[in-house]
Image (cartoon, rainbow, N blue to C red):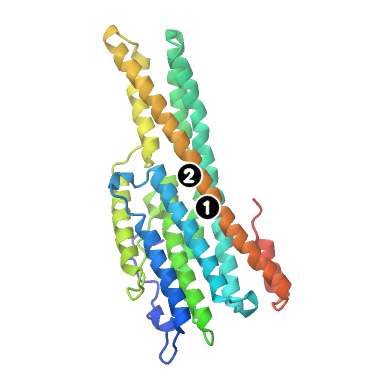
Amino acid sequence: MSRPQEPHRPFFHFGNPFRMISPKGSHLSPKLLSLLNGFEATLSERLQKLVPKDKDDILSLSWMKLAMESLSEIHCDVKNLITELELPVTGWDEKWIDAYLDISVKLLDISIAFTSELTRLNQGHLFLQCVLHKLESNIPEQFMQACSSLDSWRQHIASKNPRVETCHPILDNLVESLNLPKVKNSAKGKVLMRAMYGAKVATIYICRVFAAAFSGSAKNLLDLTIPDTLPWAQVFSDVQSTVNVEIRNIFSCRKFTVLRELDAVDACTKKLHPLLRDGLGPSEEELFKNSVSDLRIRAEKLSQGLDNLSKVVDGFFKTVLTGRDALLCNIRAGGDFPNTMLGRNVEEQVVR
């Protein structure tokens, strides 16, 4: 992420990374070129899904679910590519392994933070259920208690989650390490590193969007600069521009929350609050009944959306964890790597 008052600068200040994967005199075989082209074409398609037909869908829970599903698919594509490359872990450079394990442990931490926030937001549904129970009882004495419960819900939703705050430095670190390592004497390694670079760009971007949404702070957004020589560069640039502009517009409105479904529930509570506080007159009974019905519908939609997104985030966690575990098992089985490296990464492994 860029620091305040600092202009964005390309991450590849040392030159064009495309040259690093295809230096003069180095050529990929037709099979390797086909695998790389296939991966990058699929990456473009998955990124393109992030641009909805209606910009109002951006930062809806359904859109965030789609984004996380796409990210999980991209990571599965990388695992499939490794299999198709027929590149056993014994053929990996130690730097590749270190990079993979370092990224994966950070993604596990980020996934846990996102799950924590989704759980916290869903706990707010208990307050809303209490409110609806009191309002639908038609007992005027319980209306003030419902008003108090609405206040408790807003306080709960507005509170900060320390785990989400920890995502900021983790994502900054991932951005700082965003580069394409120079690969020598391994055509398969070049293909793998370029694919992992594409996956890392997509991962950083989507996770920063989530961090911005969950923290309520646009500082987590970042305009990543990637080389335009990559076949998926234009798609990524268009997606990033469209989504970031809309998200910054949402933040500029200074709403209670930037999550669409959560904001819809908050709008309902704002209608009900003065009715409950000041008392209902004969002319307001119909408005009150409609507002309570609207709150129930939107609260259920919010709860369902949070549940669905939680399942997808959990699926991403498992995708990253299984890939990491498989690599560690292969390292142990191969036995050709320094114990210091293996021990370090085993100790770093996240236990959920």
State the residue at coordinates (47%, 36%).
304
User: Looking at the figure, which quarter contains the N terminus?
Assistant: bottom left
How many numbered marks are there? 2
Q: Nearer the viewer, mark 2 or mark 1?
A: 2
x%, y% of residue 102? 58, 66
Q: Could you say whether the residue bearing mark 1 is in a helix, strand or loop?
A: loop
Badge number at residue 5: none
x%, y% of residue 32? 47, 79
Q: Which residue is mark 2?
A: 309
Q: Which amino acid is tagged 1?
A: Thr
x%, y% of residue 227? 35, 74
State the residue at coordinates (46%, 26%).
128
Q: Nearer the viewer, residue 278 or 79?
A: 79
Instruction: Using residue 118 as the reference point, say whether residue 63 is left or right of it.
Output: left
Circle 1 packing at 10 Å, graded few (<14), some (14-19), many (20+), is some
Q: Is residue 151 at all visible to an observer of this figure? A: yes
Q: Could you say whether the residue bearing mark 2 is in a helix, strand or loop?
A: helix
Q: Is residue 118 above or below residue 176?
A: above
Point out the residue furthest to the left here: 283
Q: Which amino acid is tagged 2?
A: Leu
Point out the residue furthest to the bottom here: 25
Q: Is residue 187 above or below residue 215?
A: below
State the residue at coordinates (58%, 76%).
86
Q: Nearer the viewer, residue 93 or 71?
A: 71
Circle 2 packing at 10 Å, graded few (<14), some (14-19), many (20+), is many
Quarter of image, res 27: bottom left
Q: Which residue is mark 1?
A: 166
State the residue at coordinates (66%, 53%).
351
x%, y% of residue 252? 29, 45
CA–CA distance in space, label 2 to label 1: 20 Å
**Marked residue nearer the N-terminal end (2 or 1):** 1
Q: Is residue 3 at all visible to an observer of this figure? A: no
